[in-house]
Image: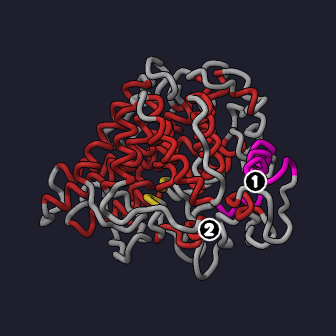
Amino acid sequence: MKKYRNTFHKILILAVAVSISSCSIDDIEPINKLTVENTIRDEASAQQVLNGVYDLGRAFDVSSFPLYLAGYGNEGLIGNGLSGSAGFDTNEVPVENRFMTNLYNAEYKIINSANFLIEELEAGKAVGISDERKAEMISETKFQRAFAYFNLLRYFGQYYDVNSSFGVVLRTTFSSELESKPRNSVQETYNLIVADLEFAAANGPIFVEHFYSGSLAAKALLAKVKLYEGKYAEAAALAEEVINNGEGYALEFNYADIFQNQFYSPEVIFAPFSGPGAEGGSNMNLINRTTYSENLRSLADAQIGAPNDGDLLGAGSNYDPRFGFAYSEETQGVNAQGKYPFASNTASQNNTIYHLRMAEMYLIHAEALIRAGGDTGIALLSLNTIRDRAGVEPKEFIDIPTLLEDIRQEKLLELFFENGEPLFDLIRYDVLGNLDASAIKPTLTSEDKFILPIPSEVLIGNNSLIQNPGY
C-alpha cells in the first residue's frame, strides 16, 4: 500500500506539472520551478493550468476510448487491433485489463487537476483577474470535471438507475495522496455533475472557439445528462435552447464538411483542440484498426434502394450517404474512415473527437420530447431535420414506439464512431422497455454487462470500493 501511495502521489504531482506546462490551447510560455503553493499567481498562470486540464482530455486512454465503446456497442468491431481491446467486441472485458486502469486514472487526473484550479481561483490566488473572467475560468473547469464524472459514471457505474448505490467515487478537493473512499450513489454523482454544469451554463464564456467549453457546451451536455436521468421535459427544453442559440452554432449544410472543418464547423459544440505534430490531436486515427458492424451496415443499406444493394466501390451507392461518406473508396481517406481524414502526426493537422455537435441536440430533443409526452409532430420535425440534411427520405409518424426506434436508429446513422452514444442509447432503450439489447448486440446478454468492471488495480488501490455486479 505504501508503494501505491507514493506512486499515486507522484502521479498527482505530475498531473499538476502537466497542467502547468501544457500550452497547446494558446501560446502562453510555461514558467519554470513552480510548486503547488505558488502555481496560481495571476490570470496568465491560471490559464496555463486550465490549458493543462483541457490537454488531459486528449491523453491516449481518454481520446481513443470512443473506438472501444463502438466495439462494446453496436457500431463496429475492433478485434485485437487496439491496446487493451480484448473482450470489447464480445462484452467480456477482463478486470485485469490495464488499459481500463489507465482510463480510470486518466479521468480522475482530469478531476484532480480541475479541483486544484477551482480551489485556487476561489481562494483568490489569481491576483488582478476580473470577477467575470474568474467565473468563466471556474465554469470551464467545472465543465471538464462534470464531463469526466459523467464518463466515469457511464463506464463504471449504473448510470441508467438513479436509485442505484453503484455510482462512482466523488472527489471535489485537490489531493496529492490516495484517500480510500467508497462509491457514492448514482443520484449523488448526477447531483454533482448537474451542479457543475448549471454553474458553467450560467457563468461560462460565450462566442468562444469550439475547443473551449463555453456556456453553450455546458447547456448541451446538461441536456444529455437530463435525458440519462429521465428528466425528459428539462432535457427537451435545454436541447431546444441549444438549437435556437444566438452564437451562430448550426447544422452544416453538407455532412462531410463537419469533419473537414473540425472545431471550426458551426455544428461542433465542443471538440478538443487539434493541430500539427505528434502531440497535436487525438488518437482517433486508430479507427483504421476497426470496421463497421453488420448492424450499422444493414441499417445504412435499408435507407436507400433495395435490400442488400449497397456498394462502397468508387463514390459508393445505395447506402445512407453518411455511411457511404465514411467508408466508400473515394471518401474513406487515409484512415479508411472519412470522419477522421488526417494521418497521425502530420505536419498540417490531426484529428479531433466530436464530443458534442448540433445534430445530437436535435435527436436528444426529439427523444426527450416524446418521453415527456410532448408534441410528436415537433419531435418528428427534429428527427427529419437531420434526415433531410443527410439526403434520405423523411420518416412518417406511425406510433410512438416506432418513432422512438426511428430516433435511436438515426442517432446510430449520424454519430457512429464519434462519441459512443449509440451504446448508451441501446442500454437506455432496453432499461425503459423499448427493446431487448441482446437482440441487437447478441453478447450484451445481461444488465451486468451494461457497464464495465472496476479494474482490479483500482480495487487494490482503494479497498473501500465494491466491484460491479457480475465481475
Whole-angstrom CA distance, mark 1 to mark 2, is 19 Å
User: In the rendered image of this protein, does residue 314 appear above or below residue 377?
Assistant: below
- Between 107 and 187, the residue placed more toward the observer is 187
Mark yes or no: residue 78 visible: no
Residue with the mark numbered 2: 256
Q: Is residue 74 above or below residue 428?
A: below
Q: Which residue is mark 1?
A: 304
Residue 341 located left or right of residue 132? right
Mark 1 in CB contact with mark 2 (< 8 angstroms): no
Q: Quadrant of the C terminus?
A: top right
Disc 2, SS:
helix
Range of residues picked out in magenta: 284-308
Camera-near label (1 vs 2) is 1
Residue 295 vs 263, above or below: the answer is above
How far across and down, in percent of the image, does residue 126 sit?
18, 61
Compared across the picture, whether 108 is left or right of 192 comes to right
Residue 413, position in %: x, y?
66, 50
Residue 213 position within the rendered picture, expressed as x and y whole percent measured from the top left = 37, 57
Q: Quadrant of residue 103?
A: top right
Q: What residue is at 55 percent from the left and 59 percent from the top?
A: 353
Q: Quick one: label 1 or label 2, which is nearer the N terminus? A: 2
